[in-house]
Image (cartoon, grey):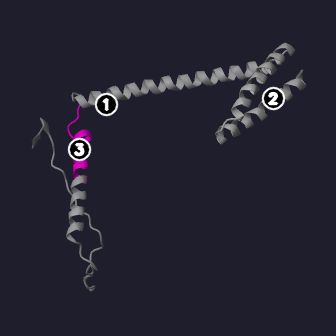
Amino acid sequence: MLRGGLISRPVRRCRLVSSKPQKSGEPAKKKETPLTREEVEALAEKARTEQRIWDAERKLFGGGISLGHPFFFVLLGSAIMLHYANGRKATEIEQNEEHLERLKRRVTARPLSPSEIDDVIAHKKRQMDLWRAKAHDTDPKTSEDAKARLLKLENDIAELDIKR
């Protein structure tokens, strides 16, 4: 059978058995409720949809893709592109982690001088002035956040005064 220039094999279909075979001594059990026409049509539509999905998947991945097929080159190109993108992303993550470690070592390596402490305290006081204005905002969420930030700034300033 020729389909789209490709030779495809016929699909093997198997019928699923939902119950055990009956023994010769047992009477046959009847269904309690027969299916209505709507239920039969719904089941038929579901089966047709599943068969269309299966056929499309088989055409794409199972039937007739060889080294000369254009879809093969699309798959190959996308696999190579993903390989390089993942490698680049992993390298960036490693570099960022190394940079963060260097920053942490540099910050903890030396204590601040008294003039640097004064500069930090002055900066934090300027921040406190800005956050005080936001604490009087009408939005309760913003004012709560601003009050929490003000408390943190006051604690930071107290700690820096102790270090001076």
Of residues 65 and 95, the one nearer the viewer is 95
Q: Type of residue at label 2? A: Asp
Give the CA distance from mark 2 to mark 1. 56 Å
Q: Could you tell me which secondary element the residue under label 2 belongs to?
A: helix
Q: Type of residue at label 1? A: Leu
Q: Type of residue at label 3? A: Ala
Pair 2/1: label in front: 2
Q: Locate residue 38: give its quadrant.
A: bottom left
Mark 3 touching mark 2, by CB under 8 A? no
Point out which mark residue 156 bears.
2
Q: Could you tell me which secondary element the residue under label 1 belongs to?
A: helix
Q: Which residue is mark 3?
A: 56
Q: Locate residue 126: give its quadrant.
A: top right
Q: Badge 1: how crowded within 10 Å, few (<14), some, or many (20+)?
A: few
Question: Magenta part of the protein: which range?
Answer: 50-66
Q: Badge 3: how crowded within 10 Å, few (<14), some, or many (20+)?
A: few
